[in-house]
Every structure is written in structure tokens, then in C-alpha cells.
Image: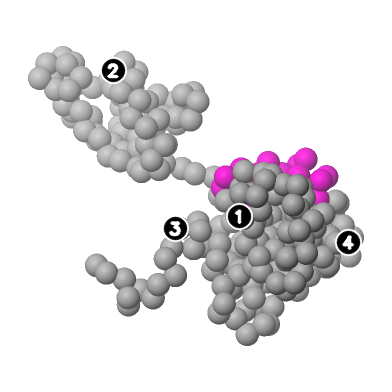
Amino acid sequence: MLTNSIGSVPGAEESMMAVYKDGKTIGTVGGGKIEFDLIKRSLKALETGESFTFKYTLNETGELKMTCGGVSEGFVRIVKPNEKLVIFGAGHVSQKIASIASSLSFDVYIVDDREEYKNSETFKDVKKFLCCTPSEALSEINLNNRSYVILVTRGHVTDYEALKEVINKDVAYIGMMGSKKKVKEIKEKLNNEDKEKIKKLYAPIGLDICNGTPEEIAISIISEILVIKNKGTLKHLSEREE
């Protein structure tokens, strides 16, 4: 967006342009060398995730070697879609997770084949409730490396069914609730899968900070996800070096 224009410049103040990863653009900031340079810089910024400000002095000694004689200033802001959180299971823990995650601006999807949960007020803030099987759900949800998956279904059979569907997906996180015994048994069932992919499974799910109530379990799970999402250290802030 152009925020300040002095003298003769190609684009008017408040001109805006959107740049997508594939190089496509919407809008204009005046065309010509400024626009070409901003598209190039914006594509690099999309890779790093860092917004930036810019200032072009439009004369023969400036970086663009233009002769307009003016000055153009503005900023480029990186806009990312919300992270997706896909929760398999609609029980008590799922309900608490969904509430917290929605408040953190995750796009929350619930997958459960029980009709009685579909229209529950508990899930009024989620992006979508999919009353179907895991495989059917994943035909509707596009998982990517900004997606987080939680398996908290009503039993080990349904957890395993969901895990089989997601284990080979390129996602940021897969967590599964269960005892160490249950986790061991399910991992053994998956022994034909890529060992590295099985290693990425966080199970038993969550951090060791809760007392076993659904609310605290949900907080421990969301905390684990935030550690991964934000590249956290699990240190107390009081221990962090300046």
C-alpha cells in the first residue's frame, strides 16, 4: 500500500496491490519499475513471512533510475490464512479444545459420525462440523503444513482409523490421546508406514501440566501445539536470556 506520495509519482496515495505466491496480482500501485520491484520483493517476503516498509526516491540517482522526480513511500504486509485445527472426536475434551482454539483464531474442524453432536451449541464457533468418516472428512478438508490434527475420538479403534488417514499427510502436528500401552499398540499396527512419519506422532498428547480434567487436558494440548507453531522452548520466561 502506498501511504505517502511527494511530487510526481506513478501511483496515488492509498493505492493497494495484493501479491500471491504464484506471482499473480490484484490492484496496482502505479505500474512500471516500482510495481515490478515491489512484486519481486513481496514474493521474497512471502517466503520469509516478514512485512516491510519501502521508500523510493524517483530520480536518476535512485535505486530504480527513474526521472519522475517524486518520492513514494508505503508498506507491504504479509497476510497468512489462519492455521487449521482438525479434531477427530466430539467429546468433552474436544469441546474444550475447540473453544480455546477458536479464541486463538484457528479455523477449527470437528470430525465425528455422531449426529447428536452436530448441532450442539458447544461447537457454534467452529469452522465446520463434519458428521462423517475420517476419509470422507479429508476429501473436504485440505490439509497442509499449517494444519494441526488432534485425535480424541471415543476409542482406540476410531483413533486408529483416523490416524491411518492422516499419518501420511504433510501437516505440522498430529497428536493422539491415550495411555502409553494404547499408543504402543497403535504404533505397532502402523509398522508398515514410514518410520519417520510415525515418529512425528505426539502421543500421549499434551504437555505434563494438567490434573486430568477436560479443561486442563485441553490447555495442555493447545500449549503443546503453540510450542510447535511458535517454535517455543518450554522454558519459563524468567529463565530466558535477553
Dot label at residue 33: 2
Mark 3 vs mark 4: which is more N-terminal? 4
Disc 4 residue type? Arg
Q: Is residue 33 above or below residue 160?
A: above
Of marks 4 and 2, which one's residue comes earlier in the chain? 2
- Pointer 4: residues within 10 angstroms few (<14), some, or many (20+)? few
**Residue 231 screen position, x and y as percent:** 44, 58
Of label 1 and label 4, which has the lower sequence position?
4
Q: Residues within 10 Å of mark 1 (few under 14, many from 20)?
A: some
- Three-letter amino acid code at disc 2? Lys
| Element carrying mark 3 | loop
Q: CA distance from mark 1 to mark 4?
A: 29 Å
Quickly name the residue at label 4.
114
Task: Confirm whether the magenta stretch covers residue 136.
Answer: yes
Of callouts 1 and 2, which one flags the residue occurring earlier in the amino acid sequence? Answer: 2
SS at mark 2? Answer: helix
For the residue pair 133 and 81, the one nearer the viewer reads as 133
Q: Secondary structure at mark 1?
A: loop
Residue identified by numbered label 3: 231
Which residue is rendered at x = 40% and y = 43% of the image?
49
Residue 236 visible in this rendered orientation of the protein: yes
Q: Nearer the viewer, mark 1 or mark 2?
A: 1
Labelled pair 1, 2 in contact (Cβ < 8 Å)? no
Dot 4 falls on a residue whose secondary structure is loop
Q: Are marks 3 and 2 in contact (CB under 8 Å)?
A: no
Query: Could you tell whether 38 is left or right of 19 in the image?
Result: left
Dot in front, 3 or 4? 3
**Residue position for label 1:** 200
The kind of residue tagged 3 is: Lys
- Report the Cα–Cα distance between label 3 and label 2: 38 Å
Span of residues in magenta: 134-148
User: Toward which corner of the image does residue 32 lie, by quadrant?
Assistant: top left
